[in-house]
Image (cartoon, rainbow, N blue to C red):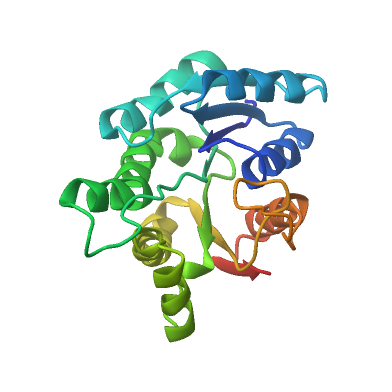
Amino acid sequence: MANTLLVCGYGPGVSTAVAERFGREGFAVALVARDAKRLDAGVAALAAKNIKAVAFPTDLADTSAAAALPRRVREALGPVSVIHWNAYAGAAGDLLAAGAPEIHAALDIAVTNLLATVSAALPDLKAADKPAVLVTNGAFGKIAAPLDAVAVKLKSMGLAIANAAKDKLVGILSARLAGDGVYVGQVMIAGTIKGSAWDQGNANLDASAVAERFWSLYTARRDIRAEIG
């Protein structure tokens, strides 16, 4: 049975590189984001590299939509073998000025809707040969006073809280799913990806290096956390 990679939060940078890296290994790729034009361009770019891909325009802030993804992907490409969660929300930049909906938005994408997608895909993952949940995270999630100060300065407080919660979730999911043979791994990015939305001309990391780290984690299936940057 062919392997299928579900990329949640597709865009320029890490998710594009991961789609290409796994696609080179024979994975079909499901691309998920809100922007249909971006997805169509991604499908075309992958097709040019002989990688089968299908677009699934979806708002990953919507829990029911996130939970419905594995079924939609299964119908179009077959069972989900690997989930790559690359989605994040920049909401609640100032936690004390943000309302509850903004804070929920940041945490829903980082935790609630990641869990909804994994739960819905679990039957597929359990039946796959080398199932995995791969999570992109950022260094704002680390518990360190200097990073906290930077998160405040850059008004990325909601993102920092969400990243910290996501880091903990990776460990818990790894322990919870180990008995089912589902590998869970995270790459924490301590830098800026060239060509990404965060790149202001001084980015220091290549997306392909992050994708290679994900591939190494996936194939080795030992360490659950890696950092790059």
Above or below residue 124? Residue 132 is: below
Q: Position of residue 209 (x, y in %)?
A: 76, 56
Q: Position of residue 158 (x, y in %)?
A: 34, 59
Q: Name which quarter of the figure residue 55 lies in.
A: top right
Looking at the figure, which quarter contains the N terminus? top right
Residue extending farthest to the right is 49
Residue 92, given in percent of the width and then of the height, sits at 31, 55
* Image point (57%, 27%), residue name: 30
Residue 53's x, y, as percent?
65, 21
Q: Is 192 left, or right, of 177 in this rendering?
A: right
Give whichever of 166, 197 is nearer the camera.
197
- Residue 215 seen anywhere in this rendered image of the structure: yes
In the rendered image of this protein, does residue 180 appear above or below residue 192?
above
224 lies left or right of 114: right
Q: Report which quarter residue 24 is drawn in.
A: top right
Numbered label tally: 0
What residue lies at 47% left-to-right and 14% top-to-bottom?
Answer: 75
At x 26% / y 63%, what residue is drawn? 95
Q: Is residue 166 above or below residue 47?
A: below
Left or right of residue 80: residue 155: left
Viewport quadrant of the C terminus: bottom right
